[in-house]
Amino acid sequence: MSRMSGAHVAMAFAVTMMVATAAGAQAQAGHTGHEGHTAAPAKVTATRVMDAQPRLDGIELVDQDGRPVTLAEAVGTDRPVMVNFIFTTCTTICPVMSSGFSQLQKSLGAAQDQVRLVSISIDPEADAPAALRAYAKRYRAGESWVFLTGTRAASEAAQRAFGAFRGDKTNHAPTTYVRRAPDGAWEQLDGLSSGETLLAAFRGASSHHHQH
């Protein structure tokens, strides 16, 4: 058996600690989820423009308060927007991704309404609005962070629009989708993005927005 390099050992340890921390936090909260969900490497690359831009028209969802909203309406703002896909019983990568959004809002403080955050459930049968409200409370979501659910078909349509559909909730990738301005292209940020990484992406988005 070949010996792992120092860099490989460090990366493996970082991923193990992130997943263990997230799973431990969920266990303490009394939430269970799947066992087969695979965490991606902790390394996060810079945003890159998506090859195929999302087509969001006609996707009808509901928010955490049970109010009907289309996906186009949910992201329809002149502020920067960040979108991710989660489900509330996930015990591995979803808590890390949601913590990243939570940390971003905390870092922005009173200015957190300057970015729209949208989390879309990929397990809509389990994630009724009440489950999303509880999840939002768990992560101290502010008013500018919207949670969406709906029918299975609507959830899949939302995932397909962003090229995020993997056929099963246990296989979805930890990706954050970023639109810097209303007339800007959608970009994607692959990996388990920390609040610091998301803040850097937001600052880049804000800088770009002010140039228009």
Image: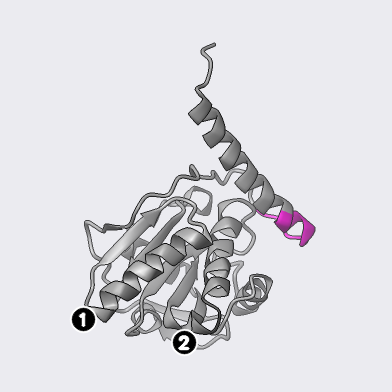
Does the magenta segment cover residue 159?
no
Label 1 secondary element: loop
Indicate how the structure is coloured in the image: one colour
Residue 82 against residue 190 in the figure, above or below? below
Residue 50 against residue 7 in the figure, above or below? below
Q: Give the Cα distance between marks 2 and 1.
A: 32 Å
Q: Quadrant of the N terminus?
A: top right
Residue at image coords 51%, 88%: 67
Crowdedness of circle 2 by 10 Å Cα count: few (<14), some, many (20+)?
Answer: some
Q: Nearer the viewer, residue 137 or 193?
A: 193
Residue at image coords 33%, 62%: 162
Give the x, y percent position of residue 175. 42, 56
Which of labels 2 and 1 is toward the front?
1
Q: Amino acid at mark 1?
A: His
Label 2 secondary element: strand
Q: Can residue 158 be seen in the rendering of this structure?
A: no
Q: Quadrant of the C terminus?
A: bottom left
Q: In the displayed structure, does residue 58 sit left or right of residue 118? A: left
Residue at image coords 50%, 45%: 42
Q: Say the numbered circle drawn on residue 77.
A: none
Give the x, y percent position of residue 2. 51, 13
Q: Which residue is mark 1?
A: 212
Q: Say the numbered circle drawn on residue 68.
A: 2
Residue 14 against residue 27 in the figure, above or below? above
Span shown in magenta: 25-33
Q: Amino acid at mark 2?
A: Pro
Q: Nearer the viewer, residue 13 or 34?
A: 13
Give the x, y percent position of residue 124. 54, 68
Does the magenta segment cover residue 32?
yes
